[in-house]
Amino acid sequence: MKQLHKKHLIIIWCSVIALSLLSLSGLGATLNGLLGISTMVGAGIISTIGYVAPLDDVKKALLLIFPPAIGTLIFAALTGGSSIAYIANYVLLAMTTSYFIKEIIIYFAVPFTIISAVCILIDPKIIDGADYSYAGAGTKVFLFIVTAILLYVATKRGSHVVEQTEETLHLVQENSKVANGISVNLNANIQKSM
């Protein structure tokens, strides 16, 4: 799990750098541009703290993934709207799935969806960019919800398959012990007969 957390932290920092460069190229060294960059860097720092913190895997995963998600919304609000920033959250959602722990998907997707819906009510360009429409913003959030549900169902199904595989492995190991015992007894009887 530690390797997975590390890979996710690297992806997060690559995303932070990409959104910072987007902000710099689009807005230059303006106040809004610098605020957008500092928001994303701050989110990256919080994720890094989550990575090194002595937490269980679910909390660590959420502390890695949730700050950049909120950071993208703040980034979009400060920079005048960015649909690209919202789309980055699909990557974060995929990261929750890679843990194969259903609770991580739920604990990320449900609050983030609610926050996204509030953002639509406050200012839809946070979700849909400068050329926003309520329909476009709503569609992005709806697709996020559908994607989260599909990933949850796939993870749940995958978890069930993993459980069945573990049960089968345990059964094979038990049968292996029995077969080994029979083999030892048979070998002993052969030696005795000889």
Image (cartoon, grey):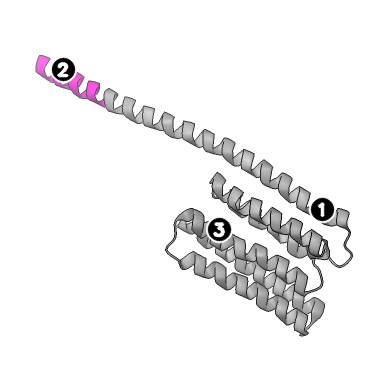
Which residue: 56% across, 67% down?
A: 47
Q: Secondary structure at mark 2?
A: helix
Is residue 24 among what the camera can see? yes
Amino acid type, callout 3 = Leu
Query: What's drawn in magenta, residue-wise?
Result: 180-194
Q: Which residue is mark 2?
A: 190
Q: Which residue is mark 3?
A: 62
Assess whether mark 3 and mark 2 are in contact (beta carbons under 8 angstroms). no
Q: Foreground mark, 2 or 1?
A: 1
Residue 130 as seen in the image, left or right of residue 47:
right
Assess whether mark 1 and mark 2 are in contact (beta carbons under 8 angstroms). no
Q: Quadrant of residue 177?
A: top left
Q: Earlier in the sequence, mark 3 or mark 1?
A: 3
Q: Which residue is mark 1?
A: 138
Q: Position of residue 16 (x, y in %)?
A: 65, 70
Q: Quadrant of residue 102?
A: top right
Task: Report if residue 182 lies within the magenta region.
Answer: yes
Amino acid type, callout 1 = Gly
Quadrant containing the C terminus is top left
Residue 184 as seen in the image, left or right of residue 142:
left
Residue 190 as seen in the image, left or right of residue 179:
left
Residues packed near mark 2 inside 10 Å, few (<14), some (14 to 19) or many (20 plus): few
Q: What is the spatial separation of the Cα atoms under label 2 and label 1, in whole angstroms?
A: 77 Å
Residue 155 as seen in the image, left or right of residue 194:
right
